[in-house]
Image (cartoon, grey):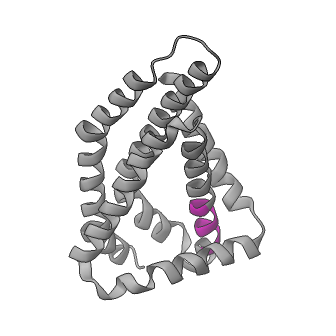
Amino acid sequence: MKRSLLLAAGLLAVSIVGGILAPPSYSRDALNEMRQMLEPLHSIGPIGLFLFIFLNNSIKAFLAIIFGMFLGLPPLIFTIFNGLTIGAVVAAMKPVVGWAVLTAALAPHGVLEIPLLVLSTALGLMVGLETWKRLAGRESRVKAELRRGIKLYFKWILPGLLVAAAIEAFVTPQVVKLVGG
């Protein structure tokens, strides 16, 4: 598990840096896509936003574990995509709002959400490793890893994502306002 956690965290970090260092056109495109996706959420209010964030993150985290059965590739793609997106949005927004507002917009909920999503990826990677073992004809514990992943999901990840979504919907906007965003 330790190696999978390190791989997931390292991959996320490298992907974030990749998103930050990507050409400005990539950052602009990522930011525009995110704005288009989030535009309809302005009208749903904070409770609707909370529910959307919670459902979005909890479904993705669950699928990262379950889809680990496909040789661990979906959790890797999930992590790379999220890292590149975070990095690209940071690169596009930093010149506009500065580090203080960016930190205020990401840190309050990100301190919970990011480690929980990394844990989901790591659990999916563990399932994927066991799938590889089975395909290679070696002793495999795919079902056991899947059960462990689902158990950890319901015990820690899902409740943590609930708290992170509440922070993102209700606390983060207030923190951003306090720092001048």
Residue at the bottom extreme? 43
Tell me the residue at 52%/83% (across/down).
36
- Image spot of residue 118 (x, y percent): 47, 42
Q: Is residue 152 left or right of residue 80?
A: left
Q: Is residue 34 left or right of residue 62?
A: right
Tell me the residue at 40%/48% (across/down).
61
Decide which of 107, 162 is in the foreground and name it. Answer: 162
Q: Is residue 88 magenta?
A: yes
Tell me the residue at 54%/75% (across/down).
34
State which region is magenta: 85-92
Decide which of 86, 96 is in the foreground and name it. Answer: 86
Decide which of 13, 64 is in the foreground and name it. Answer: 64
Which image quadrant for residue 95?
bottom right
Q: Measured along the vertical axis of the image, is residue 83 above or below residue 38?
A: above
Tell me the residue at 68%/61% (across/down).
20
Q: Is residue 15 left or right of residue 63?
A: right
- Image spot of residue 131 (x, y percent): 55, 27
Please identify the quadrant where the C terminus is shown.
bottom left
Q: Is residue 76 left or right of residue 145?
A: right
- Image spot of residue 62 (x, y percent): 38, 47
- Image spot of residue 141 (x, y percent): 45, 18
Q: Measured along the vertical axis of the image, is residue 113 above or below residue 68?
A: below
Magenta segment main secondary structure: helix
Number of labelled discs? 0
Q: Is residue 150 magenta?
A: no
Residue at the right extreme? 23
Which image quadrant for residue 174?
bottom left
